[in-house]
Amino acid sequence: MAEVSYWMGSEKYLCDPELAQAFHMSRTLGMPLLIEGEPGTGKTELPIHYAKDKDLDLEVYPVGSKSNVEQFVARFDHVKYLRDSQVEILNAQREEKGLTGRLSTGDRNPEVLGDYVVKGPAAKAYSKPNSVLLIDEIDKAPREFPNDLLYALSHRKFVMPESGEVIAASEEEMPAIIITSNREQELPTAFKGRCIYHYIHFPDKETMAKIIEKHHPDLEENVVRTALDIFYHLRRLGLERAPTTREILNWLKYMRDIAPEEALKKIEGLAGIGALIKTQTDMERVSRMIGAGNSFGPSYN
Amino acid sequence: MLESLPSAFRKHGLHTDVRTLLLLRKSMQQGLIKTLGDLHNVLKAIVVKAHTDIGPFTKAYYEFFLYIPMAPGQTLEDAILRSETFQKWKMDHVEEADKDLTDTDLVTTFLDQVHLTRYDIQEVVSGKEIWDGDNPDQEDEDADENSTETERLLTKMADYSDVSLEELLERMKRVRDQQKTKHEGGSHWIGTGGTSPYGHGGAAKNGIRVEGQGGGKLARKVLNDPNYFPIDRDATLSDDNMDAALSSIKGVIEESATEKLNVPLTIQSGLKRGGLFIPELSSETNEQMKIIVLIDNGGYSMAPYVRTVRALFKKMRTRFAQDLEVCYFHNTIYNKVYTDDRRTKPLPIQKLLLYDKSYRVFIIGDAAMAPYELDSQSITNLKAIQAKFKKTVWLNPEPIAYWAHTYTIQAIKELISMFPLTPHGIERAVRYMNSQHVSE
């Protein structure tokens, strides 16, 4: 039976109930979960922590501008196949000439086509029951990639190239598929129709405090509170690139090793604000508006 | 009622069809829907396909299932307070002791109950179990009261897992019809025989504060935040819809991912192997973005758009460092354009025409001028640009309704394909460009 228990997050990962519910739903219905949201809100972290927490196999496919379905499912290694068949001929020739040394083809046998099928993350995930498959940043893919995935997503079946082997997962053993996107391009409607969609809202102060608690449990409460005040203030300024969860976690990581009083001072003096602000124009804006002045960048006074 | 769900949601610009209903039914069979809150969340996961759908969805949901219609600009709280559904709920579920609660508190309670999901109930139950397990000796009367209260809460939850979708909707319809006839003192409100899907109104008082996920809180937030509503793709380009425009304009980047035979490398490594030639493949990407932007920055009519247009293309440049030429002109293109916005550095049109023909040309201007300004020289030049660069479009910030009344717009439109300067218009322009093929 598929892993369909309701997962609420782990020690390291705070899964908000709405997301937990959408995730549960996607697994129960055997549909992929498409997660969107601001960068740095933990989209990619969900499957990673879920797999770790439940001790399941995780297959990751990071999508890039060169992604194609072959890489994702499986491809036939023509080059190796050609090489091995050439090697066979070469070996025969050498034998004729009475030479002893043979060139090796590894464990591969050119007679067995399956030896030359290089399985991608999808084929691997589908051949293991109840695994977790992460397709990261699908919006970075060439336009035809999501459309090519449609067949696989709706039929739960892949046919291996050349060898014709069929890898299929029953509805019960479907891997949990998580797809993340940053909305850099619009996904085809037909594709989205086959997914359960969830948009991660940016966490409010309370939730953020809980998230920080999970990552840096040893931080003093007032340090976190002060940092959060500044953080949400910065987000309200309407910067070109507003700081996100990832950024505040990094910032506090830097504060972690400092004594609380000192850290408090540093936070108020906006030390190490470079962890939060990522562009020059934003930096100028912040300095103009809250007068961070000369405390830019990590200052080690 | 069942059949009307897709069309009712479609009115809010959402994509719903028979598949929505099939999925809903499947979720029901899998036991995913037990309360109204579940119905909201499941339907949301099925229907919503972009974060800009969340706003319209929330509206549609309240209107369709709770019969709380929302007028434009009305807040959720106001809509709830004015609805009969709420009045009815208040009569049936609010006890004497709570009479002095403010409207805001009441709405909050109402929302909490409407959005109560079966997950919340499970949490409450497991929370109680843990508590019982931890303090077996300290269990006193209070605790007993608590546990009975929990059970009451659970038995009072309408369990929809055995009910079919049609039945559920039918039941809701009945109640809805009933609510339309005022004050028909029925003993139930959605759900029969005392099983209200909203839990018990008094539950919160007795220590089982159902710690909901704030579905109601979220609904409030969503309806007050324009981020969750689709931007008007037919509005003239501005800072607000710049990102939408950017995503449509990105279609001009021609991307391809192909593997090609690398001949030199194959020969080289083949020679090293002593004549055993194994094809060497190398992946090749062509990202092409060759763009010329010609902006009309003369005259007051264009002033508001120049900055936005420049920001748009600047954003594009930072994301894809490619060939992007920006030139300026006034009203129409005579024998030269200018490479600076103060129009002091001229670039003869002949030089512009020397660019590779695979460049895409965006001309941005309102094309409104005195008819004599559009002289034969200008027309010749526009024709020359169109002839050289097959992928040329004119983007016009002027509302499309006025186009027919301006002579020069009509004239230029005949020469160069013209689209409105809106995210939607840009998208169509890009699609038009992509359909033009530049011969090698």
Image (cartoon, rainbow, N blue to C red):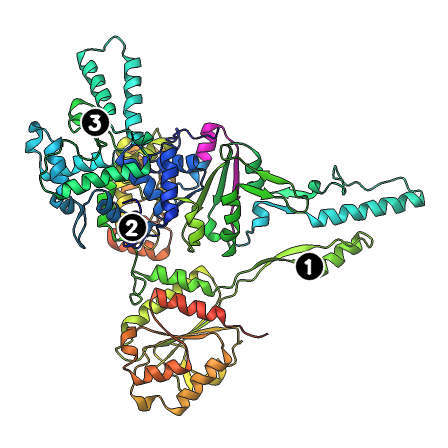
Q: Position of residue B94 (x, y in %)?
A: 11, 31
Question: Toward the viewer: B173 or A207?
Answer: B173
* Residue B405, picture quadrant: bottom left
Residue B209 numbered tag = 3
Q: Quadrant of the C terminus of chain A?
A: top left
Q: Which amino acid lies under the numbered mark 2 shown in the image of this protein?
A: Phe
Q: Which residues are magenta?
A: A48-64
Position of B234 relative to B187 (above/below): below
A120 sits to left or right of A130: right
Q: Position of residue A210 (x, y in %)?
A: 31, 33
Residue wearing tag 2? B9
**Alpha carbon distance from label 2 to label 1:** 54 Å
B72 sits to left or right of B428: left
Closer to the chain start, of discs 1 and 3, is 3
Extreme residue in the top direction? B137
For the point 52% across and 48% down, which residue is it? Answer: A151
Closer to the chain start, of discs 3 and 2, is 2
Q: Which amino acid lies under the numbered mark 1 shown in the image of this protein?
A: Asn
Q: Using the rendered image of the protein, determine whether residue B117 is visible from the camera's viewpoint.
A: yes
For the point 65% across and 56% down, which residue is it? Answer: B282
Position of B38 relative to B246 (above/below): above
